Amino acid sequence: MKSYIISNSKSNPFLKTLYLRIFLFFLLIQIRSCFSSSPAPFIFPLKTQILRSPSKLQFQHNVSLIVSLTVGTPPQNVSMVLDTGSELSWVHCNQTTRNNQPDPTIFNPNQSTSYKPIPCFSPTCVNKTQDFPIPPSCDSDNLCHATLSYADASSSDGNLASDTFHLGSSGNISGLVFGCMDSIFSSNADEDSKTTGLMGMNRGSLSFVSQMGFPKFSYCISGSDLSGLLLLGDSNVTWLTPLNYTPLVQISRPLPYFDRVAYTVQLQGIKVSGKLLPIPKSVLVPDHTGAGQTMVDSGTQFTFLLGPVYNILRREFLNQTAGVLRVLEDPNFVFQGAMDLCYRVPLGKTRLPNLPSVSLVFTGAEMVVSGDRVLYRVPGETRGNDSVWCLSFGNSDLLGVEAYVIGHHHQQNMWMEFDLEKSRIGLAQVRCDLARQRFGVGL
C-alpha cells in the first residue's frame, strides 16, 4: 500500500499536494502540542510560621504559609511566603558571610554561578513590570532596581535577577526572574532577622506561576495542625470532592484602586447561621475608582471587609452570641488594628461553645467559616483568668484598605484551586491533613 501511494503521488501532482498538506497538518499539531503542554505538576509541603512577614496590611505579627525550596548553582535553601496577592517573588540577599559561614536564611548571589542580574533597559525591566505598585528604576550599575513598600512603613528593595529554582529531583527551572532584596527595613529592627522571602503568585507577568507557565495551581491548609500542601499544575485526582467555581472579575481599564492582577471574585452576600444579611448589593461591587474589589489573598491571615459590611456582620454576630460568650468591654483594644469584636473565655475552658457560622457567598460558590475558625485566640493576651478571642473578620476601613480581602485563616480545610486558563477559582470542603497523606507529602 505504501509503495502504491508513493508511486502514484509522484505521477499525480494533486495527490502529491494533498499528502504534503496532510503531513504538514499533523506536523503542526505535534509542534503545537509540544509548545502548549504545561509543565509536569509539582507538590510541596506547606507549613505555617509566625513571623513579621512582608504584609500589605499593618500587622505586628502574622501567621504565614511557608514554602521551602532551593535556588542557585549550587543550590541554597530559601523559605518563601506563599502570597497570591503579590507579583514579584523575592528572597533576602546578602553578598557577605557571618564568621566565614553562610547564613542559612539568606541567599548569597556571589555563590551561585547561574545568578544573572537584570539590566534596567532590558525588555524584562521595561515591559514586564507595568503592574508593579512602584515602577522599577536604574541603580548606579544600570541594573533593574525594585522597591516594595507596605502599610506598616516596612519596605524592601534590591535588584531584579534571574537564577535557577529547584522544584524537586527533576524540576530545575533556569532563568526565573525574582527580586534579590539586600535592604529590608522594618518598624521593629529586632524582627528583621525573621523576614523571609516571598513567592508571588498573582496573575502578573513576573509572578512565579506565570513564569512557570502552569495553567493552574492549588493549595490546601489543614485546620488541625495548620500544615498543608501546594500543588503547581493540574491535580487530576479522582478522590477530590467536585469543586464549585466562581469566575474571576476582570476590568481591563486601569483604575486607581483596582488591582488588575489580583485574584478578584464577586462577593454576593454574607450569611450568619444561614441568615442572609441585609447588605446592599451596591457596596459589594467595585465603584468607579476600583475600590471595593474582593481579593483572595494567601499572604494575608484574616478576612477584612469594608466598614459598612463589617458593621452589619459585627452586629448580627453579636446578637447571635448574646448570652453565649462574654464580650470584652475594652474600647481601647483592637486586635491587628481592625478587629474590635472580642470575647473573654476562661483559661481553663478547652472547647468553645457552639458558634454561629459565617458564609461568604460568591457567584457560583460559597465559603463556610464554622467552629473555632470564626474566632481567633489572641496570642499572649489575657484579662484576669480569661483568654481573649476575637471575631476573625476585621474592618478594612481601619487599615486604610479600599477592598475586601479573604485571608488564608478562612481557607483552612478547603481545596483552593486557581485556574488561570479558565479565569476562575474552585473551592470545596476537604480534610487537608488527609489530602496531604494521599499525595504522600511529609513535613
Image: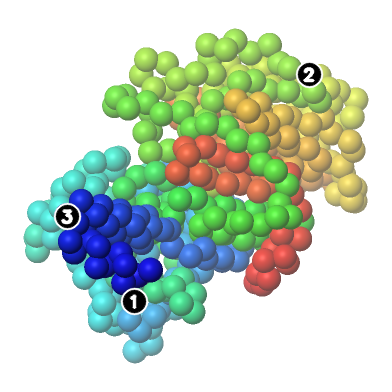
Nearer to us: label 3 or label 2: 3
Name the amino acid type tagged 1.
Gly
Could you tell me which residue is drawn at 48 percent across and 65 percent down? 40
User: Is the Cβ of the residue at disc 2 closer than 8 Å to that at disc 1?
Assistant: no
Name the amino acid type tagged 3.
Pro
Residue under pointer 3: 13
Q: Name the element at disc 1.
A: loop
Alpha-carbon span between mark 3 and mark 1: 57 Å
The circle drawn on residue 72 is 1
Is residue 378 toward the left or the right of residue 352 in the image?
left
Residue under pointer 2: 275
Is residue 413 toward the left or the right of residue 79 in the image?
right
Residue 323 in sight: yes
Name the amino acid type tagged 2.
Lys
Residue 152: quarter of image = top left
Q: Name the element at disc 3.
A: helix
Q: Position of residue 15 (x, y in %)?
A: 24, 54
Q: Name the element at disc 2.
A: strand
Q: Position of residue 103 (x, y in %)?
A: 41, 79
Query: In the displayed image of the protein, which residue is found farthest to the bottom?
Result: 100
Could you tell me which residue is drawn at 56 percent across and 66 percent down? 44
**Between 361 and 237, which is closer to the camera in this rendering?**
237
**Between 172 and 190, which is closer to the camera in this rendering?**
172
Residue 89: quarter of image = bottom left
